[in-house]
Image (cartoon, coloured by chain):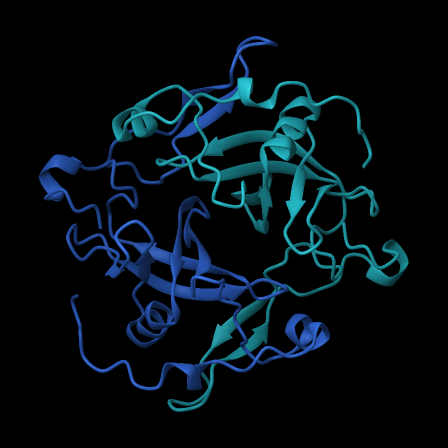
Chain colours: A blue, B cyan
Amino acid sequence: MATPGNDGDISSLFSPRGAAREIEEGRAFAPKFDAAGLIACVVTDLRTSELLMVAHMNAQALKRTVDSGEAWFYSRSRQALWKKGETSGHVLRIAEIRVDCDQDVLWLKVRQADAGACHTGRRSCFYRAVVRTAPDAPLSLEFRDDERVFDPTKVYGGNGS
Amino acid sequence: MATPGNDGDISSLFSPRGAAREIEEGRAFAPKFDAAGLIACVVTDLRTSELLMVAHMNAQALKRTVDSGEAWFYSRSRQALWKKGETSGHVLRIAEIRVDCDQDVLWLKVRQADAGACHTGRRSCFYRAVVRTAPDAPLSLEFRDDERVFDPTKVYGGNGS
């Protein structure tokens, strides 16, 4: 991890979940982490509004994100905290964090370095559209906005952050 | 449900999950449903690019969405398939569906009726920003873009779709 340090008392950052009305209309930040302790995060580019990626945070990743102003996530496949850009240098600087009505999804508006958010080398992870080519055929994918903005084989050592 | 009908053979719409390279660089649509059979869906407004909501689909909701061109979801709290706008009339017409690199998140670009996507009456579910008011205080929320575009008490009978 880039900044091991002491994450302090994480729970003091959040308020307890109250009644639905408080969660939806109140000013207390009471995020709902799922059974695995995670909350989904939608990441968009502040300047272009483009959807870049979707990832998950645990409480520790959220605290580090708030403290550092750069996005940290929790990888479900690797079961580890990770800082976006730790390997690639493509950090995501937080411009704003929003939360949805029932406080179980976060929206990060970010400024990203002049490179891609996707480990495949694209600006966004969403470089394919779902299309129907024939009424009875399986759905297929069509590449869109799929230009590579960096070479992933040069940037990553098989890591992908 | 609005259109019970016969959903036919759902699995024939999707391809089996292959190796990572096929999933990331292929043209086969092989969505990854989680242990509960769900996939997360990010919904944005086609015209403004605004993030409207995040919801989940099961395979049946995805099939109905593809077949009808209007968004269907699966409610985890109500454990039921639902059509967005079934009660409110605020349907989401699909302009494009994208999938991310590892095919475990969908992005729906939609045209929404001249009303809000959020059951609280706002255009978007993300009407509050997470802010730090003091170094040691819990994080709090600040209302932003929170104008109500419809009156939820007039639109819903306690349903919220």
Give how far across and how far down residue A97 sits, in percent.
46, 66
The quarter in which the N terminus of chain B is drawn is top right
Picture quadrant of residue A123? top left
Residue B13 is left or right of residue B65, and the answer is left
Give how far across and how far down residue A68 sits, in percent.
28, 73
Q: Residue at x 74, y 62 (%)?
A: B120
Q: Is residue A83 visible?
A: yes
Residue B61 is left or right of residue A44, and the answer is right
Instruction: Examine the rendered structure and indicate whether residue B93 appears above or below residue A81.
Output: above
Using the image as rendered, state which of residue A151 and residue B26 is in the foreground. B26
Q: Is residue B151 visible?
A: no
Residue B8 is left or right of residue B100, and the answer is right
Instruction: Examine the rendered structure and indicate whether residue B102 appears above or below residue A10.
Output: above
Q: Residue at x 56, y 49 (%)?
A: B50
Using the image as rendered, state which of residue B4 and residue A71 is in the foreground. B4
Picture quadrant of residue A7? bottom left
Give how far across and how far down residue A89 sits, in percent.
17, 54
Q: Residue at x 41, y 28 (%)?
A: A128
Give how far across and how far down residue B26 sits, in percent.
33, 21
Instruction: Examine the rendered structure and indicate whether residue A116 appears above or below residue A104.
Output: above
Residue B76 is left or right of residue B161, and the answer is left
Residue found at the far front of this picture: B35
Q: Residue at x 28, y 27 (%)?
A: B19
In the rendered picture of this protein, how many numbered marks are placed on residues? 0
